[in-house]
Amino acid sequence: MSEDRERNRLSGRLSRVARVGANMGAAAATFGAQRLAGGNDADKTIAIALRQALGKTRGPLMKVAQILATIPDFLPPEYAEELASLQSDAPSMGWPFVKRRMRAELGADWESRFASFEREAAHAASLGQVHRATLHDGRLVVCKLQYPDMASAVESDVSQLKSLLGLFRTFEKSLDPSEAVEEVTDRLREELDYTRERQHMRLYGDLLAAQPDITCPEPIDDLSTGRLLTMTWLDGAPLLTFKDAPQEERDRIATLLFKAWWVPMMATGVIHGDPHLGNYSLTPSADRLNLLDFGCVRIFPPRFVAGVVQLYLSLERDDFEGTMAAYEIWGFKGLTRKLAEVLNLWARFIYAPLLDNRVRTVADGVAPGDYGRKEAFEVRNLLKEHGPVTIPREFVFMDRAAIGLGAAYLHLGAKLNFYELFQNSIAGFNEAALGARQDQALQRVGLR
């Protein structure tokens, strides 16, 4: 395709993205100008404009940008760096909105159902905001209120999301994001279903009940609906409060993070798909980890979990055919040996600390914000030559969660024997047994 035709296709896609409003239109104009002008700094300039535009956009597109920024192998480094700097905090909506939402969900007498209710939001994000309250029995709770018209906003923004990712696809031909787009869209829809999030919360409380040092909030059913989620308040300090704590304490926190993420995966094929640092807090003595926010939870088919274990064991044995079979289990299609070799570069990076039987950091000499960037850049360049490759749906949030957890370890400067932790977790793994446990667990909380 000629350069002029390529630019025309870009302009068409950008015009569709610009329909989300003036903010995205400004980013689109910057993209068009920079692509026409070219230069070494074009991508950086475009990425800054896109970050500035999305930073002013409340709702699904902002949420998508935050998701994409946490998957280093998905975007070129300039874009990932800028989108990673987006703040999750957004201006909260005022008391009139709060009254309307609470009245619509709980009725005109909603205030009488609380002993107290704070008018100012404790936290506001892209899809909703949180208010502290006290029940008549003295329990402290938080009420998560969904912003107006978010369901329709998700549906209308789905096409814009596809245009936006299509834009990346135009100049980054190593990856085909088509299945990943559907995965992100489905998770966004689930995040707006607070009834489902309540079930996720109960599921995690069930799965982690045998872990006394990990706590999940409890939903308050009679004060919750599909757009309002009321849950118990968990006292705790942010994870980064402990980054200068003694090494032993930081290592204990990192072990708790591993348990909170990996125990549910091996028990029932479930992961917390949003490992943002803000989704954890710790008691002042750091002896208990609070796991928060269950809007983005991924439930994998047992076969996918079996593929995770098979890939690990195949890498450990240096069994190339086994790694190819694992990728096929995950849903990679049309794999050649060359493509599998490229994917193995990424897999060996992700699995590296799990294959190394010693006490170590998750990635020696790497800053938290750089975790996976160099390797993703190398893999992307090789895929340009041997690809493209379609990212399977299930891979997206598994990859995101693994990278997010690794970054948390680096923030803490944790040093663990990850090999021992992982080996103990997969001992006696059986796909059929996991499937049976998954059915039982999901049935208990109404998810199946």
Image (cartoon, rainbow, N blue to C red):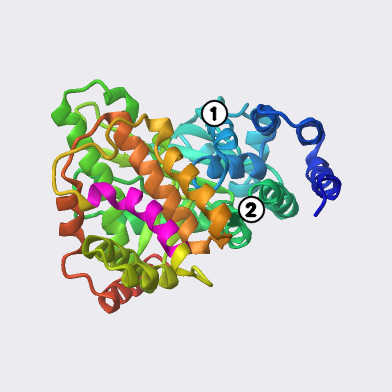
Disc 1 crowd rating (10 Å Cα; few below 14, some 14-19, many 20+) is: some
In-image side of 334 versus 215 (left or right): right
Q: Badge 1 is on which residue?
A: 85
**Which residue: 37% across, 60% down?**
270
How far apart are labels 1 and 2 at the CA level?
25 Å
- Residue 255 shown left or right of residue 297 in the figure: left
- Image location of residue 271, percent across then percent down: 38, 56
Type of amino acid at the residue the image marks with label 2: Lys
Residue 410, position as x, y percentages in the image = 31, 33
Residue shown at the point (32%, 64%) measured from the top left: 311
Is residue 114 in view?
yes
Location of residue 307 (image quadrant)? bottom left
The quadrant holding residue 4 is top right
Mark 2: few/some/many CA within 10 Å (<14, 14-19, 20+) = some
Quadrant occupied by the C terminus: bottom left
Q: Nearer the viewer, residue 43 or 70?
A: 43
214 above or below 30? below
Quadrant, the N terminus? bottom right
Mark carried by residue 374: none
Q: Quadrant of residue 46?
A: top right
> Is disc 1 in contact with disc 2, using a CB cutoff of under 8 Å?
no
Q: Position of residue 110 (x, y in %)?
A: 57, 41
Q: Is residue 352 magenta-colored?
A: yes
Residue type for callout 1 = Ser
Label for residue 173? Answer: 2
What stretch of residues is rendered in magenta?
339-354
Q: Main secondary structure of the magenta part?
A: helix
In-front residue for pair 67/207 = 67
For this orientation, the residue located farthest to the top is 244
Q: Residue at x 27, y 49 (%)?
A: 352
Based on the picture, tell me whether residue 198 belongs to the magenta stretch: no
Whether residue 163 sits left or right of residue 256 in the image: it is right
